[in-house]
Image (tube, grey):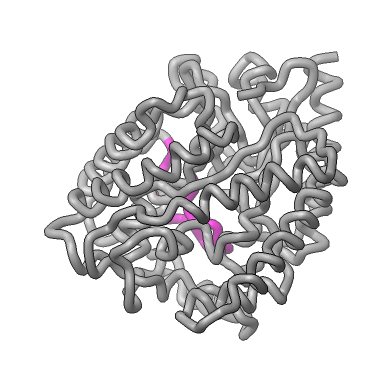
Amino acid sequence: MQTSTNRILTTHAGSLPRPRSLISLHRAKFEGTAVAETTLTQAIEAATRHTIKKQLEVGIDVGNNGEMGRESFFTYLQHRMTGFGGTGTRPIMADLLRYPGSLERRRQAMGTDERVDLLQAPKAIGEVRYVNTDPIEQECAQLKALLAETNSNFTEIFVSSPSPGIIAAGMQNDYYDDLETYVNAIADALRTEYQAIAAAGFILQIDAPDLALERHTLFQDKPLVDFLAFVRIVVAAINRALIGIPPDRVRLHVCWGNYEGPHDLDVPLEEIWPDVSQINAGAVLLSLANPRHAHEYHLFADPAFLGDKVLIPGVIETTTNYVEHPEVVADRIERIVQAIGNPQRIIAGTDCGFETAAGSKMVVEEVVWAKLRSLAKGAAIASKRLLG
């Protein structure tokens, strides 16, 4: 994994804006409507080519395919695994229930446009197994081909795959005896995808919002100890799935849910970190730009807290249409570096993705690219101050 040596590198958390035509195709397939695969493949390729170009234009160093080929950051696996079907239920986040006006505001913000609704995800109705490696292999091959076509000068490329915990939490279990068995079955299946991404030469990003988000979602009515027990189950399952993949080829993304809301029931980072930090990932991407967690960079002043990991702090917020001033971005980077003590230990990133499910856009596309351009400009300012 490349790190910031002569300058602060920039990246993002994965999902980028999809064109409306592609959203419609993903939505149809998600709902079980027959979609012409040739049409979908062509739309994905065109959208991926565009998003690669835009990332390069705005100055992203460590980029990806924008997740154009996926309906969402985790439900796409229903097309690659056996065992999923029907429609499950998903608890609404406790902070939105606590403030009903926030829930209504979220619904209004989403509007009536076509989108993949993660609260209506399929559920486990049979044995979960990874049976079709063609899609992930084709996804990686397509990305390589498009990178070569554009003569891209990215520093590095990552491809994401979900944590077994977010699948277990977001896709209801109607088959396995208990949650732990379900998590482990998913992890065994995901190992195939993790290995394929690593074998293709890309950095593997594991998207694990479950390690924070589920405290106020699936475990909202349970004591903290129950949630932490779940976290430990997921951590152990991820580590088993990662066997054979060097930690410096893995980065972990943890967040408290990519939605505009009060977030005043979020579990503090210090509560989950002792377990989360045990995942065999060389870097961790954390939400540190939003108003609820911006203060938690202080925790990294203790050298033992981060250990030998690289930190990818979110210095761009992903649920509002404010475009951060480059000086604000630089200030955020600088104070985090001051806490850690070494600018080479960070890569500047975003709090989360910008379209984690097709059509779920809280930030308009033009503003997404403006935010990422500001990220690059702010990192350049911070680089001059910190690295000369």
Q: Position of residue 41 (x, y in %)?
A: 65, 65
Q: Is residue 208 above or below residue 303?
A: below
> Residue at 31% across / 45% down in the picture?
187
| Most common SS among magenta residues | loop
Q: Is residue 323 above or below residue 250?
A: below
Q: Quadrant of residue 244?
A: top left
Q: Is residue 106 above or below residue 298?
A: below
Q: Quadrant of residue 86?
A: bottom left
Residue 268 located within the stretch drawn in magenta: yes
Q: Is residue 4 left or right of residue 125?
A: right
Residue 184 located within the stretch drawn in magenta: no
Q: Is residue 174 visible?
A: yes
> Residue at 58% across / 51% down in the picture?
138
Q: Position of residue 232 (x, y in %)?
A: 27, 38
> Residue at 42% across / 42% down in the picture?
268
Q: Position of residue 345 (x, y in %)?
A: 62, 20
Between residue 142 and residue 14, name the one nearer to us.
Answer: 142
Which region shows up in magenta? 254-269
Q: Quadrant of residue 350?
A: top right
Between residue 358 and residue 344, name the one nearer to us.
Answer: 358
Q: Is residue 54 left or right of residue 246?
A: right
Q: Position of residue 200 (x, y in %)?
A: 56, 36
> Residue at 86% across / 14% down in the picture?
388
Q: Is residue 248 left or right of residue 168?
A: right
Q: Quadrant of the N terminus?
A: top right
Between residue 96 and residue 213, name the one nearer to us.
Answer: 213
Q: Is residue 200 above or below residue 188?
A: above
